[in-house]
Amino acid sequence: MILRMNKVRILGPRERYPEALRVLQDAGAVHLTVPGPDGRLLPLRLSTWQEREHRHLRRLLVDVEALLEALPAAGTAAGTAPEAGSRGGAPARLDLTRWAHLVRSLQPGMLRLRGEVAALAEEHALLVKYRPFLSTFGVILRSERAWPHIAAYHVILPAHEESAVAGLEAALTAVVGEGFAVETRRLPGGDTALLMLVPEAEAARVESLLAAAGVHEIPVPSGYEARSLAEALPRMMDRLESIPGELQAREEELARLAAQYRDELCHARRGLHNRLRTLDAMPLLGATRRVFVIEGWVPVSEGGRLAGSLTALLGGEVVLEVIDHDPRDEDVPVSLHNPGWLRPFEIIVRLLPLPRYGTVDPTLLVAFFFPLFFGFMLGDVGYALVLGALALILARRSGPGSTLRSLAVVAGACALWGLVFGVAFGEALGDLGRERLGLHAVVFDREQSLESLLLLAIAVGFVHVLLGLGLGVFTMRRHPRQAAARALTAAIVVAGAVALGALARYLPETALLPAVGVLAVALVALVAVEGVLAIIELLSTFGNILSYARLMAIGTASAMLAVVANDLGSAISVPVLGVLVAVLFHLVNFALGVFSPTIHSLRLHYVEFFGKFYRPGGVPYRPFGHWDPGAGRT
Amino acid sequence: MAVTIGAALAVGLSALATGWAQSKIGAAGAAVIAEKPELTSTMIIMLAIPETMVILGFVVAVLILLRVA
């Protein structure tokens, strides 16, 4: 349901507005709005000092958040650690001074440490890339400097180019004759390390040859100012050994800083956010020279508590009054409020913009019809059990109130209805249940009774669309013409269904004449109310009902594919192979059988059902309160 | 034979129409999602809308076959 709201006005002496704001922030229940037009009221603008404070707080907050980001996480994700301290109101001046001092003292050292850690990690990663080559040719490389008039080339060939070594040797023979040496070693990753030694006099020709062949030497890492890999080697090996120790020392230092300051920084962040929220709320207040006025929306259930808090904390000088508002006012903020068991289904409604205030929250209906439609289309005991198991795993691996938990609950409800319809249709992995497990169709067989299934699907659509039209009459109650149009459309749909039923002999023939009479009168009335274009709308409503035929079509397709999977498996003479093929086919059908009913159930709700009554565009209810780390930034 | 061809045409032509419509919506949807990933769910629903044609085509095909049978 949509939470009922009262519009409230809070008045008091102008000098007491900061305390009133603090009480409101602690209560966290008022969605602030700009006070109604009144020539005597002016917006409460920030003073020059407050504007300066706002800028200062904003900068300080950025610094505090950067420091929290730089600190290693202490058991929880960085930046989302449990907030220390109480949910206090605006921070004391002393706190602000201390936090600014804390930031100034921590920032240089912390940023230096983070920079060093990043640089060391990068250097280590680079040297690790060289390690296989160094460990393979380390001995030779160390003695390179002692060789006079010899040029060394160091190359790593990818695994798929190993055969190029022979070609390279042939090319070198052609260029420098027999006066060269090539050593190769297979590296752990499959690449080939290659060391070439050639006379220094031939170096230029060899380099041309390598360049022409697209063979590139291993570059010497930047930061090692030696002339060659051989000269850089000793330093690189030493660094490779010393970096982990240096890295650990800096990380320990960061961990020490985190243990010492994280709680205080979290406290500072909360305090800064809260104070900024107060300053941001001030322009929404109105004031005269002596009085301040705050207006906003409060849930009806919260009004009494809020008035009590104001009286208790401000001694009756600040009063709260409920003021009248236009019932057609659509700017009233909207908060969906449903029992815990229903809340997971709100994710389906929340995929669309919120409904407007004074209309209908369809969560309860969605919770019933969405899994019902899904189950109707899936209708297979085997697939439903697999889906139920997946929902159970998802529920166990997700936190309470999370989106994943909501999905698990919705999937569980869908699996339950899938099971019910699976039993009703006597299907378990297609016809396998009937053939091997002794299942039989309780209601009817989907493969044989297509016509019955189609009629049932359209009947479901008739009920669903009629319900939508009924809700449309309610949501349009303040717009008489539109409400009347929906009521007349509903009457025509019912009369049309009765007439068709009588013609098809499902209903007594005596019902035909009254039905046609109602149909004609309602049609004329509809055209009179809404004009000729209402006929098009009426036809689309009939189209909407026929659209529910997809319940039958998708369900039948899924059932047929399951039968094909079984037939394909049994047609293969090798039993193991047959089972494997059948399982693979069933897996594909299961994926389709979950995806397709989800999409089409959503579509039936959003297009066919919601189209009759749902009025999106509600303003989300955002009460003025304390900053919540899980809800985003100020 | 003619009945079977009629049923095949009912489902085949509507499948072609659905495919054509979905190709247009899918291309536009991919562009929308690239710029506004939060509209992914809406685009999936949009993509499912033309499937009504092939579903009704399938229903008509079934009715043709059932009537003859």
Image: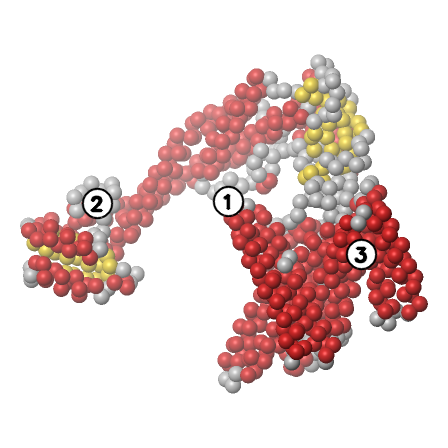
Residue at 18%, 55% in the rendered image: A212
Q: Secondary structure at mark 3?
A: helix
Both marks 1 and 3 on one chain: yes
Which residue is located at x 18 percent, y 43 percent? A226
> A403 or A309: which is nearer to us?
A403
Left or right relative to A42: residue B39: left
Residue tagged by mark 3? A466
Query: Under tag 2, what secondary structure?
Result: helix
Amino acid tagged 2: Arg
The chain ID associated with circle 3 is A
How far is mark 1 from mark 3, CA to CA? 50 Å
Question: Residue A354: image x %, image y %?
Answer: 69, 44
Mark 1 or mark 2, which has the lower sequence index? 1
- List the residue tagged with mark 2: A235
Q: How many marks?
A: 3
Looking at the picture, does residue A162 appear above or below residue B46? Answer: below
Q: Residue A567 appears at what percent x and percent y?
A: 59, 80
Residue under numbered circle 1: A77
Residues beneath discs 1 and 2 located on the same chain: yes
